[in-house]
Image (cartoon, rainbow, N blue to C red):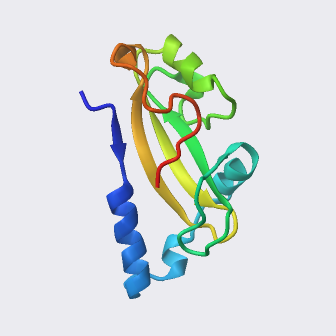
Amino acid sequence: MRRHTDYALARRAVLRDLQRGSVTRLDVCDAHPELLRAGRNVGDVAPYDCPVCGQDAVRFVSYVYGEKLGAANGRCISYAGELEKLGAAHDEFTRYVVEVCLDCRWNHLSRRELHGRRHAESGATADSGRRVARR
């Protein structure tokens, strides 16, 4: 079973549309204030500059969703080891990794991953912690 979905092609399409003028910067730089807050306080620094404004303010923010997560459903992963702890306690849940620029408010879903005991035997992703260094 596929454990992750990478949205790099969709990201490139949005950036291409921005460059061509099909969409405006206002269309793609619309991060919610809570996403910006999470990026500022618990986000991981991206290894690249913002594709829209060129600043080095891009952060990765992870959120988890799952039927059986209870109070953790929809929460932001805020400390190292939290993802592994949830994975050991639950059969299945999904992690969504969003990239957000703290300067211009660019944001895009970067990656979707399946986690939990059901997926543990197939091995961890290349990066089982909070960090995701993909473009």
**Residue at image point 33% right, 31% down:** 3
**Residue at image point 34% right, 69% down:** 13
Query: Quarter of the image holding residue 63?
Result: top right
> Residue 73 in the image: x percent, y percent?
53, 30
Q: Which residue lies furthest to the right in this view?
A: 41
Q: Residue furthest bottom?
A: 21
On the picture, is 66 further left or further right than 10? Answer: right
**Residue at image point 58% right, 59% down:** 48
Q: Is residue 133 above or below residue 102?
A: above
Q: Quadrant of the N terminus?
A: top left
On the picture, is 124 further left or further right than 63? Answer: left
> Residue 25 in the image: x percent, y percent?
53, 80
Q: Residue furthest left?
A: 1
On the picture, is 86 further left or further right than 34? Answer: left
> Residue 93 in the image: x percent, y percent?
43, 26
**Residue at image point 42% right, 73% down:** 15
Q: Is residue 73 above or below residue 23?
A: above
